[in-house]
Image (cartoon, rainbow, N blue to C red):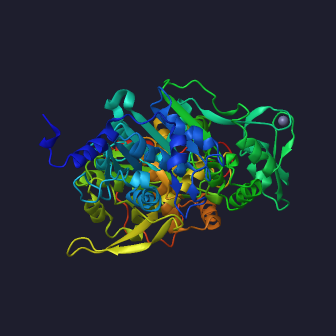
Amino acid sequence: MTAHAFTNPAAVLSALRRAAAHLVPPPDMLPSVWAEQNIRIPVGNAIPGPINFDNAPYQRGMIDVVKEPGIHQVDYMTGAQLGKTTCQQCIVGFFIAHEPCSQIFAQPSQGDMQTFIETKLQPMIDANPSIARKMAKARGREGVNNSRIKSYIGGWLMMSWAGSPKTARGRSAPKTHADEVDGMVATAEGDFVNLLDQRAASFGDQRLQTRSSTPTIKGVSRIEAGFLAGDQRRYFVPCPDCGHEQFLKWEQIHWNGRKSTGFEDADLDLHDEHEPETAVYACEECGSCWDDGTRIAAIRGAEAAGAGWRATAKPKTADHASFHAPEFLSTFRRLRDIVTSYLNKLRIGDLQSFVNVSAAETFEERGEQADPDSLLARAQASTYTSGTVPAGGLVLTAGVDMQPDRLEVEVVAWGEGEQSWQVDYQVLWGDPDAPDVWEELEELLSGTWEHESGARMPLLATCVDTGGTGGNTQSAYDWLRGKTGRRIFAVKGSGKWGDPIVRAPLRKQSGKTARKVDLFLVCADEAKLTVMRRLAVQKPGPGYCNFPRDREGEYFQQLTAEKLVTRYVKGFPVREWHKMRPRNEALDCRQYALAALKIANPSMRRAAQRLGDAVRPSEPAVAQTGGDAPSPESTKPAPVPVLPQIPQEEPQPAPAQGGRVVKTRRVLRSPKVKGGGWATRY
Ligand SMILES: [Zn+2]
């Protein structure tokens, strides 16, 4: 065996040397040290050039945690201007070039992914030869390098996004990174973040899952849940005056004009006497005021002084680290700018953005999320039962939600300032493609309800959902056709934020010879917001919602089944309703009853007058008006023609004396005889 067996020994040696370079374990090096030696931030970023963590020393801990022994899960709950993307770039780069292994990087949407590749990842690769030379050429022999997968010696980086859970299937990788996890919504295909976790699950000690996000709404924020499950690291900074080590808090930022003590009483700052340029940080121990120079020097010197990142809680599992980094920790932001941003957001009613993006804290919805327990307690304290209309109710509307096996109907009384009283809630079981359930609905909507005065009230208007998920739209059209004159309207959810609750009808041709159906468009986002804000009104008066005392708990679970959530798409907040519970028909019914009121648009003053006229003793207009009294022996008053200009299309047939009537009779109970007053004659 001699060397002459090779025709080109020099080339063989060189090849062996290149191969051996990949067999030698990489030097044990902290990722932040590797980054400072190898990563240049491309031009076009805030601070281009070689990375130097002395500017923002908190980034070191956020990066080096990925090599901390025993850590497999890291959550970053961060605000703006903290260099979160820089940290991610360094971590991804480290696992490409220094300690190569396969990685999956996930964003909320494909667009977010493309933006990340084009503005962050590719420029970083291009600017850094130490990374670029490890990458496979596009369509080269070494592997693929396309828009979704980038191969390199020792692994690949696969891009994935929550909008398409299949992008997280197929391959497994020891390292997974998810950005803006609060913007990742569970879909019918499953929960994307869990799916992503499964990709790394089989890698044992090699496994690392990082997740980052601007937090959103308290209770639904994934990143907050992750932060709380982890060891809750906060960056401690020593006071230059007393040495007390503290993590920076919004409460400690002072300026001339601040009257609030926190976000709970932020409304106290809604005045014009602010001087943001006086903003300082006040030590929580000795009260000494740090200007920006002092604050930034204290942050930069924290680790040298023995402070810096510290766990503040025991993690649920020992392998879970978590970080909280608010914007006031940033060495790139001045307090005056942060305060100005706070005041601007507060003025336009968008405190949430500031709380999420600057304080990196979750926001507690005030008013957009009603509490089912307090509504149940409200009902239990109520003075009326379902089927009757309390004195304040002046007009009645109904909302009908269509489901594949039933219709759900709510009847609501409305008074001054749109204060509301739920009068009835019924579930009519039956397939909407068959006639029975519609007959039952007809019967219910043709009924009258007893007002506290003794008058009987018909419905002013009704909205019937036609856009159900069960594909029964045509059946709804068939039943609704020709009923507009009776103010029974077809509605469908549609529209975007800012649209009116109801928009003018589309004329919907349904069937070849059929008459057209007027289809009103209900802006579900706005209608729900109005309903939710009103449910949160605590004092009887405008907007307040009353419920009968026999209404039970499950109803209120449904009514409050959705929550307004803000998520961030490419840094912009998007408000959306998220279902917190599977059933939400009660909320839909209320939306449609509100839409019916908006379409009919009655004058409450005139409605009150008519109601008074109808029950005035001098006008004993009993029994002549029509045949819709539920039973012949009745001495009930006639239906009040609340808005007489509505043409009564045809005399309502008396309800059939069949099984269904039992339900109707429950609604149309006999009037109570009251002692004294003008109502007694009935
Ligand atoms: Zn101090």
Q: In the rendered image of this protein, does residue 277 appear above or below residue 314?
A: below
Screen quadrant of the N terminus: top left
495 or 7, which lies in front? Answer: 7
Q: In the rendered image of this protein, does residue 622 appear above or below residue 601?
A: above
Residue 24 in percent (x, y) is at 36, 35
Q: In the rendered image of this protein, does residue 504 appear above or below residue 565?
A: below
- In the figure, is residue 547 to the left or right of 401? right
In this orientation, does residue 180 appear? no
In this orientation, does residue 307 appear? yes
Q: In the rendered image of this protein, does residue 87 appear above or below residue 311?
A: below
Residue 502 in percent (x, y) is at 48, 67
159 or 484, which lies in front? Answer: 159
- In the figure, is residue 149 to the left or right of 273? left
Q: In which quarter of the image is ligand 1?
A: top right
- In the figure, is residue 374 to the left or right of 590? right
Residue 671 in percent (x, y) is at 53, 45
Residue 542 in percent (x, y) is at 66, 55
186 or 295, which lies in front? Answer: 295
Residue displayed at 37% across by 61% down: 652
